[in-house]
Image (cartoon, coloured by chain):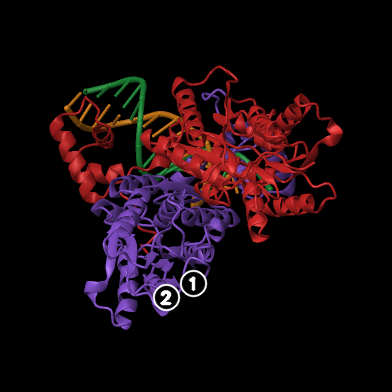
Chain colours: A purple, B red, C green, D orange
Amino acid sequence: MPDQKNKMVTTKDVAEVAKVSVSTVGRALADDPRISEQTKTRVKQVATQLGYVENLPARLMRGGRSNLIGLMLPDIRNAFYATIAEALSDCCSAKGHQLALSLANDPQTEARHIKELVSARAAGMVIVPSVHPTRESLALLKNLPHVQLLRRAASIGAASFGINDEASIHEGTRHLLELGHRRIAYVGGTEELSTGRDRVAGYRRAMREFGIGADQMIEILGPASSPEFGTQAIADLLASPDRPTAVLVSTVRITQAILEYLHERGMASPETLSVVGFGDSPEFKWWGPGLTTLRMPIEELATSCALWLFHQLEVGATTDPKYHSTVPATLIVRGSTAPCVSP
Amino acid sequence: MPDQKNKMVTTKDVAEVAKVSVSTVGRALADDPRISEQTKTRVKQVATQLGYVENLPARLMRGGRSNLIGLMLPDIRNAFYATIAEALSDCCSAKGHQLALSLANDPQTEARHIKELVSARAAGMVIVPSVHPTRESLALLKNLPHVQLLRRAASIGAASFGINDEASIHEGTRHLLELGHRRIAYVGGTEELSTGRDRVAGYRRAMREFGIGADQMIEILGPASSPEFGTQAIADLLASPDRPTAVLVSTVRITQAILEYLHERGMASPETLSVVGFGDSPEFKWWGPGLTTLRMPIEELATSCALWLFHQLEVGATTDPKYHSTVPATLIVRGSTAPCVSP
DNA sequence: ATGAAAGCGCTAACAA
DNA sequence: TTGTTAGCGCTTTCAT
């Protein structure tokens, strides 16, 4: 553990040793054409020798923004978000940016992190917004170029990149309907979140298209990333008098919880229940007969999101294009869904 | 997307509007006891009204370090590291720190990220070091309080927190030996990494203790986080003339690759092969008969690592305690290991 | 090709 | 209780 009070080497120190002025040092290190090659070489040599490292805060004081890119996620242990973090980190590295990771599940924490980023004069941020960003968050975001990812808060007037949630869930539901299922349960996040709204809408549309009324729909909505909620939901479903023949899950964490529950109770799929999951992880292949699931191009999504943000940073982003991009999911059919055999 | 050129509100602006001096503003916002409650309230009100956000770089220029804590990881998609990131993020939030995530697999990228952290005057960092940190990295770390996590590079003279790798793998190997296995293969990372060295050492010790000579040991070493290597390794093992009756895997990623391989080929465990995995994820329970594996208290490890770092930051860390802490793994016995029935 | 000096926003020592 | 001022390390005119 090094001594913290260790004075750092400054341009002034370098200047003294190299016997030039501070401005010459600054210019030499910035490869200014006005400085002779000879001086440049000498200055750089001295700088390295002394272990000079530029003082970013001091430079930032003269205006401009730091190379920090904020990434606000609800949960890094979710494979979805980990993939996003990795893709974004790659993009940042390529552009010389530094990633600041903020994990927030509630609007207050979110606001605090945004404030810190603004305070640090971050260059921009990628945010998966919470349900109801605070007024403060919204005001702060006015001073920070940003892009929304996955979720979309209407109150935030920025470009957004997401999954086509409605169409994805619609496809999953239709798959079950075409297999003859009619008592199909939907388990997912609440309608507070844009994603929750869109997803349940996809379920409803598919059901309606097969002539199933709202009274026949089985919807269990709760906290999107709560395994406990998922466990409770599947338990309730299986215990209900007219238990469904199939279930469609619409979040990663709930999917994992349900898979775990069914496995622990030794309840075989698709015999007991046909299951359509959300997201795709390697282990979904070896869960029971293999999980039929919706795969999303998360990595590509995060990359295009980053590219767009960087582009905005470069061009200065004076306009407000309100660009909204969505990508579709792919249904991966495995063993967990089978034709309905119930009455 | 907001206008980037938007001038930010400074203390001077607040001072003008509130009709006080800049220092009064600074003190009022810092809750200095010398300022009257009345003035404080007014200044704070004006600051909020104007949307004032402190300029962190400017404050840092006066010396001291930022609230940035760097976290250097090889791979955020590995559940191990994601858990660490989350635990650390929680600790940082609690202490008002901001997490800067750096993903680096090679010494050059690692060096670049460390330099950026030093340049940004980060408060400290938690690092899972690469095999051979560059000379530059080592020099830079002298100016940045840090702690090593999981891996330990001898060249870095800092406190370290890790798994007791030798003992853990020893326990896993002994479990197989006690089940009667003798042809036990070890698949893990190379001996370049401290973890790789310790782990294979645990395997060797256990084997020796059961009277098995070095010539009877089956070791396949390669890149620790390469699924491709894992796939190749298990393929080779199964194709070999005297195929082992059991395999012990010593990294998370290789474990995942091997599980996938065996599942895809429909090779049942423990009939074909007894398997002891590394790490523990929910899905290990439902892989085939359930994976016997070594579970590590990663979250606790990361937390204690963060606590230690924060403590060092607080006390100033003038001494160099070279504190090394290791926690043991727990063997979780499931269905993938069974008594040896081969000749 | 190089140097001197101003100023970025903030804090703290010194004044009042 | 509040104001004045110096200076942190760097870039950027403006001089030389």
Q: CA distance from mark 2 to mark 1?
A: 7 Å
Q: What residue sits right under mark 1 in the picture?
A: A331
Seen from the viewer's position, the closer of residues A272 and A331 is: A272
- Whether residue B50 is visible: yes
Q: Mark 2 near mark 1, Cβ–Cβ under 8 Å? A: yes
What's the chain of the residue with tag 1? A
Q: Residues within 10 Å of mark 2 (few under 14, many from 20)?
A: many
Secondary structure type for disc 1: strand
What's the chain of the residue with tag 2? A
Q: Residues within 10 Å of mark 1 (few under 14, many from 20)?
A: many
Residue B294: percent from left, percent from top? 59, 37
Residue A77: percent from left, percent from top? 47, 48
Residue at the extreme left of the image, as rendered = B38
Amino acid at circle 2? Glu
Answer with mark 2 or mark 1, whichever residue precedes in sequence. 2
Residue A175: percent from left, percent from top? 43, 76
Is A322 placed above or below B131 here? Answer: below
Seen from the viewer's position, the closer of residues A64 and A310 is: A310
Dividing the picture into quarters, in which one does residue A48 lie? Answer: top right
Secondary structure type for disc 2: helix
Q: Which mark is residue A171?
A: 2
